[in-house]
Image (spheres, rainbow, N blue to C red):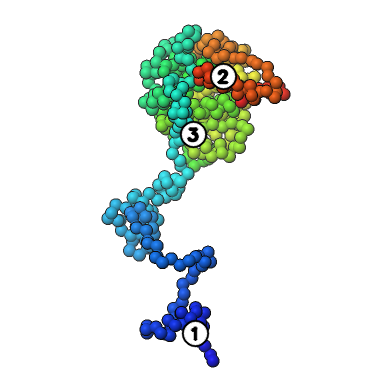
Amino acid sequence: MRTSWADSVTNAEGPEAAGSATSGTTTNSRPTRSSYVPPHLRNRPPSSDPAPAPPQTDSTRAVTYSGPPGGNRWGGGPPSSTGGGHTGFGGGRGGGGGWNNRTGGWDRGRDREVNPFANDNDAITADPAFEQENTGINFDAYENIQVDATGDNVPPPVNSFAEIDLGEALNENIRRCKYVKPTPVQRHTIPISLAGRDLMACAQTGSGKTAAFCFPIISGIMNGPVAQRPRGARTVYPLALILSPTRELSVQIHEEARKFAYQTGVRVVVAYGGAPINQQLRELERGVDILVATPGRLVDLLERARVSLQMIRYLALDEADRMLDMGFEPQIRKIVEQMDMPQRGLRQTMLFSATFPREIQRLASDFLSNYIFLTVGRVGSSTDLIVQRVEFVLESDKRSHLMDLLHAQRANGAHGKVVSFFVINGLHPLI
């Protein structure tokens, strides 16, 4: 007996389907096809109640595609009367999913500025010792440090940050850093730099040099004319350059400068060797106003034509004597004299050094123009506020001895900053 296609389908579906097909009261004699069930859902038990459809709100309605009929090509229909904006790909002003919105589309990679004080706030909450002044700085002890400034028309020093017009945003960041009053090098350096003078400063280690040259640079970029940078090329044009000898110092300067520049519109980027260059290039492509770099990596970026120095307004060299000791003088002279950096007199240069040897004097005469010479404390030494102690410990006992020192310091109620070094085969890595 020949069977039709409908009979074969009915027999495959089972006796219940066959009974319903023979005893059905519908007028349609042709059975309906069963709906397709994906393989990963075939073994699930049938649900007694169908899942309710989610309510359609303005936000969900704004990002759905309504189709070309009844509206324009991209909008998908007329504006919604409930304030949800246009539907369709664009999402409208109410949907927030358009191409030009910060949350998606072309501007998707543009992140909001990260709060550099977030970790500090966590530390303040966790440790009550950080609730007072900025740790590691005894401001009252700085009053007895001798400062000498020589040069033509030296601007007078200031006694508080309130006397300096740095801008409201920068002053707010200074309060966030809990800087009570300027250190001696800051009292003299900031007015000199704000006056547009070149500076050669011999300051001790730990005297607050980073803030001394960061404050005038950030304030000058904020209050100065808007830079008209070329567009279309992948080359970046920073307005300020800070050179430092080591990666650790560059990272430290970058972290402090980010705190000072928070919510000022000034972007700080760091570039140093010994790390992959791709991530640093991506940071540079996002924009840079202040570039903190080591000489070797900066020369590499300049030779790649990824950085141009033709718009530099401020040049700061931190620990210049150490850079010369490490053999960076050829790279420094190439950066300052042989690239496209503006000549002295057209830029403002600040040179900081802990010592004043003959090489530094020659460097100052070549890089600076009508500069002011500033000495803070005893030249060639570290500040008296830093206690330096050398202890000889066996190799196997170094880690436990370090932990004992840290626990003893906490037990004595001393919450200052500690820097520990250990010697391995003549090297001095930092813990």
Q: Residue at x 42, y 11 (%)?
A: 156
Which residue is the extreme one toward the left? 81
Q: Nearer the viewer, residue 128 or 272?
A: 128
Residue type, mark 2 in image: Ala
Mark 3 to mark 1 CA distance (whole Å): 76 Å
Q: Say which quadrant the N terminus sits in.
A: bottom right
Classify 228 as above or below 330.
Answer: below
Q: In the image, which disc is placed on residue 288? A: 3
Mark 2 to mark 1 CA distance (whole Å): 91 Å
Q: Nearer the viewer, mark 3 or mark 2?
A: 2
Q: Residue at x 56, y 22 (%)?
A: 407
Q: Nearer the viewer, residue 416 or 412?
A: 412
Q: Nearer the viewer, mark 2 or mark 1?
A: 2
Residue type, mark 3 in image: Val
- Percent x, y of residue 389: 61, 14
- Percent x, y of residue 177: 44, 24
Which residue is the extreme one toward the bottom? 1
| Earlier-in-chain disc, 3 versus 2 | 3
Q: Say which quadrant the C terminus sits in.
A: top right
Crowd class of label 1 (few under 14; some 14 to 19; many from 20; radius 10 Å): some
Q: In the image, which disc is placed on residue 17? A: none
Q: Identify residue for label 2.
A: 408
Q: Nearer the viewer, residue 401 or 28?
A: 401
